[in-house]
Image (cartoon, rainbow, N blue to C red):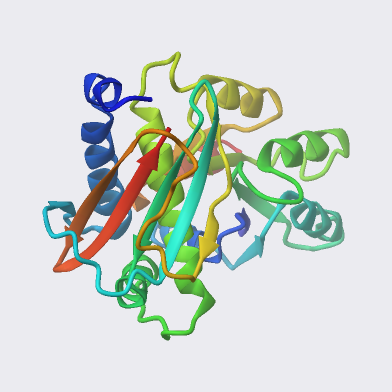
Amino acid sequence: MRALIIDDSAVMRKVIERALRQSGIDFLEILQASNGEEALEILRGDTASTMKIGLIISDINMPVMDGLQFLEARRDQQLAVGVPVVMITTEGSEPFVLRAIAAGAQGYICKPFTAEQVKARVVPLLEAA
Amino acid sequence: MTVQQIQDLDWVGRLDSAVSEVFEMMLERDCAPTEKADIADPSISARILFSGSIHGECVLFASRTVAQVTAGVMLGAVSESDSPMIEDAIGELCNMIAGGWKSKLGSDEAICAISPPTISTHPTAEPGGFFEGGFRRFYCFEGHVFGVYMAF
């Protein structure tokens, strides 16, 4: 299983990576992007990979391309179709949550969060995928 | 925003609660308000802007040493004193505190956007000054003190 973490904070990417590693899922590789545009590039390159990305974790507030724009671009460009996306963000207000779900997010975690919360959201999505 | 309005809305209590939650969940540390208001070298700050139904700012300021300790706890490893991860960690901490504070507001008040954090490594003994009313709180975890200034 490969995963992609999208967050402009390198510290937060490491914190999320640690939470994923503690979830009990065997991640072979955890890729990282600092904004939505970088993430789209990774997904375009992933089409030829034998072991495709099976999970995407994304922040919302990011420079260049934010998490909601990323979700919409991913949907429009038909990239990583069927891959679960979980948003991890400080933006927990209803308009953001509804827009993220409409654009294809399956899970939503508000910062601050615990590793247990990440596990509780991610594991059922991967089991269902 | 007047002092009376801030008191009426319990925005200080909500900030205390947001800081405590962030430290408990992300750093697995207790963090409580302190009267100690002397930060020897407030050499790093992170600033978040609120825009929408609330216009204001949240500024977190700390010494480089406290910022370094905080980054180390978040990362689970000691950071070098000149590591860019220190600025990043303080920015993310401010982001989560501001977001946590916002989430505790009423639904009408909470319709506001949060900017990405802006980091400053210049002295920030007197943060703010862009808004008319605000408050400053100091917090302590394991003997390390930092401040949060909010203004509206």
Image location (x, y in percent) of residue A32 = 64, 63
Q: Nearer the viewer, residue B39 or A2?
A: B39
Residue A60 sits in quarter:
top right
**Is residue B62 placed above or below B84 in the rendered structure?**
above
Image location (x, y in percent) of residue A36 = 73, 49
The N terminus of chain B lies in which quarter of the figure?
A: top left
Q: How many marks?
A: 0
The C terminus of chain B lies in which quarter of the figure?
A: top left
- The reply to whether residue A124 is in sight is no
B54 sits to left or right of B38: right
**Is residue A93 placed above or below A6 in the rendered structure?**
above
**Is residue A55 placed above or below B79 in the rendered structure?**
above
B149 sits to left or right of A71: left
Q: Nearer the viewer, residue B84 or A122?
A: B84
Image location (x, y in percent) of residue A34 = 67, 59
Q: Nearer the viewer, residue B55 or B82?
A: B55
Q: Nearer the viewer, residue A73 or B139?
A: B139
| Residue visible at 38% across and 55% down in the picture | B60
- The reply to whether residue B85 is in sight is yes
Image location (x, y in percent) of residue B58 = 42, 44
**Is residue A105 placed above or below A12 in the rendered structure?**
above
| Residue visible at 60% across and 54% down in the picture | A7
Residue lying farthest to the left in this orientation: B35
A39 sits to left or right of B140: right
| Residue visible at 28% across and 38% down in the picture | B15
